[in-house]
Image (tube, coloured by chain):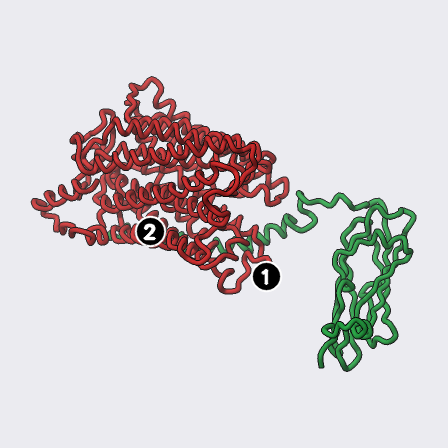
Amino acid sequence: MTDAAHAHGHDDHSHGDHGHHAPPSGMMRWLTTTNHKDIGSLYLWFSLIMLFTAGSMALLIRAELFQPGLQLTNPDFFNQLTTMHGLIMIFGVIMPAFSGFANWQIPLMLGAPDMAFPRMNNWAFWILPVAGVLLMGSFLLPGGAVAGGWTMYPPLFIQGGISYDLTILAVHIMGLSSIMGSINIITTILNMRAPGLTLMKMPLFCWTWLITAYLLIATMPVLAGAVTMLLTDRNFGTSFFNAAGGGDPVMFQHIFWFFAHPEVYILILPAFGIVSSIIPTFARKPLFGYASMVYATASIAILSFIVWAHHMFSVGMPAAAQLFFMFSTMLIAVPTGVKVFNWVATMWKGSMTFETPMLFAIAFVCLFTIGGFSGLVLAIAPVDIQLHDTYYVVAHFHYVLVSGALFSIFAGIYYWLPKWSGHMYDETLGKWHFWLSVIGMNIVFFPMHFLGLAGMPRRIPDYALQFTEFNQIATVGAFIFGFSQLIFLVVVLKAARGGVKATDRVWEGAEGLEWTLPSPAPYHTFETAPVVK
Amino acid sequence: MSAGNAKTLGKLVVVTLLMFGFGFALVPFYYKICEATGINSGAEQSLVKNTQIDTRRWVTLEFDANTNTSLPWRFKPLQTRLKVHPGQLVQVEYEVINNSDHAIVGQAVPSYGPARAAAFFKKIECFCFTPQTLAAGERRRMPVLFVLDHAMDPEVHTVTLSYTFFDMAPKAAASGLRNLMPHG
């Protein structure tokens, strides 16, 4: 998708007098690039490759679960698949994809020439594939990849083999990458906005990423600390979590979820930003309640720090603590409800059209809300003790992460791809991709609610006979959903190579600085800052 | 890199490092919170409350210790009397000292008074379960963990637990269990 941008970059240079070097060609161009657009594309391609990698693992999991009993995998390999699927989807797909959007869009939306620290930006991306190799390579090691669950709970995680050490190292690297990316984003947003572009005039995508980046630098170091403690428990004789040495395994869960609950908002706040950009464009109305959106995002971020133990109701906790975490969790529904209300109010009486980005954005609003409601059900402590570690939880977090985070990423790609590549994507294929995805996704995950209510435990390759039908439905849905992503690949490749030339504004109702640029966006943009009235 | 950006970078790096330290600080912090609020202190856990304790009555326990005359050990309970509720988990300790100049294997055999209390005296962990080998001059403290079943006859108000240590050497010799004997 950047070939055109690349070519354009050359043109720009031939008559430019800014002293920029033309990017080197071939592999070195990508390895050494400090251009925010190149790095954004790298993040997005990396994310796409990882989506297919971790998606294949999901299909293997669903294939195994098509029937009770063991068909394709053994229990240990099955656990490796669920663990790696989770780790890669979170750290290798969703987070890098949002970083890709941030790199492409934040400078364009703010009227900045590039990110604040381009060299650090390059590092932040290029250490990611190293973490990917450590994770994927551990499949080949004796004992296989990690099988202790993406949450890395001890005692399992302090007992496994060499691949557990490699995974801890990979988590360190991915955390470092996120922290560097976040520092870049915060600095860019705080210091490099175009004159006149006050914080409260910024596109909401920048706001949600600013808050996400703060969440990242507040929680990623805590995760780094937690996995460092795992590492020293494993190798250097400490006993933070090792009960044999006086440690407490539950302590890990407290520290981990102090990171990981804000992390789930890290995975969704940028999605809110993307959707808040798309819905006004296709409703041809400004976003309803901009200021309340900003405050709602900030409230969600602050509340995310005081709800972590709702992941741990079943470990044993005094009733007062259960009540506190239960009610504080439910409180998050208020700012989230404000957001959903604002999106619906934006669409209300709008002149709506339903191009693929809008379809994904509307599906996001509907399905993310379902995921939010099942989250409220799980927030009720007595109910959670019943549903803990069942497929109800699996259904819940896939509704918020697949039809939430992933759909917003699809929406954002369809929305900005014409600006990035200069070509319109294939609308017919886009619609096919949307409908197959939204139908397939619901066929996979909706039956899981019932499986969970009926008591089917997660992370087990076998199940009782009465769960067979719903599992078979889910598996059929998974293959529809999985293979329809190949359509997405085709759409992206086609738009990257050529197609109908996109106009500068691309969408009739699009507002914002990025749409004032030519399509494709030139290699260097806003070298003189635009003035925002 | 402009000066403004460098300043922001510096601040954010400090935040990052502080949060890394905060992760580790959470460990003592959680222990302190639990200590101060009484959360997580064993029996206080709200989810596991022992409902088998009969708090309406008290039973006096007496502890006694003897050694068989052929065994040159000194053996005594560290507490002689204890008042408990039936159903309560109790741990007591005995001390044994080998006064001889060589290692000896001994095993304790319990007896109860009154004898009908024996069926309700549920030992979970006891040094009497296995033979004990004591080196010359060795002193050892040994726990007994038990529950006095709440179903015990309410007429019984005092239960005596008495242990007698026997030298295992004759038995080991008779059964050919040479490996029970310490070598050298």
Vertical position of residue B180 compared to residue A404: above or below: below
**Residue A89, percent from left and from top:** 39, 43
The residue that mark 2 highlights is: A128
B16 sits left or right of A100 in the view: right
Residue B6 appears in the figure: no
Q: Decide which of A462, A221 is in the foreground and name it.
A: A462
- Give chain A's shade: red
**Tags 2 and 1 on a common chain:** yes
* Residue A232 in the figure: left or right of residue A169: right
- Total of numbered circles in the picture? 2
The answer to whether mark 2 and mark 1 are in CB contact below 8 A is: no
Q: Amino acid at mark 1?
A: Gly
Q: Residue at x 33, y 49 (%)?
A: A183
Sequence order check: which comes first, mark 2 or mark 1?
2
Quarter-of-image position of residue A282: top left
Quadrant for the C terminus of chain A, please.
top left
| Amino acid at pointer 2 | Leu
Residue A321 visible in the shown view: yes
Direction top: furthest residue: A349
Q: Residue at x 39, y 27 (%)?
A: A439
Residue shown at the point (78%, 69%) measured from the top left: B95
Instruction: Compute the Cα span from label 2 to label 1.
Output: 35 Å
Which chain does green denote in the image? B
Q: In this rendered view, identify the residue nearer to me: A175 or A499.
A: A499
Tag of residue A111:
none
Q: SS for tag 1? A: helix
Where's residue A166, x and y in %?
41, 57
**Tag 1, which chain?**
A
Residue A66, given in percent of the width and then of the height, sits at 47, 36
Q: Which residue is mark 1?
A: A245
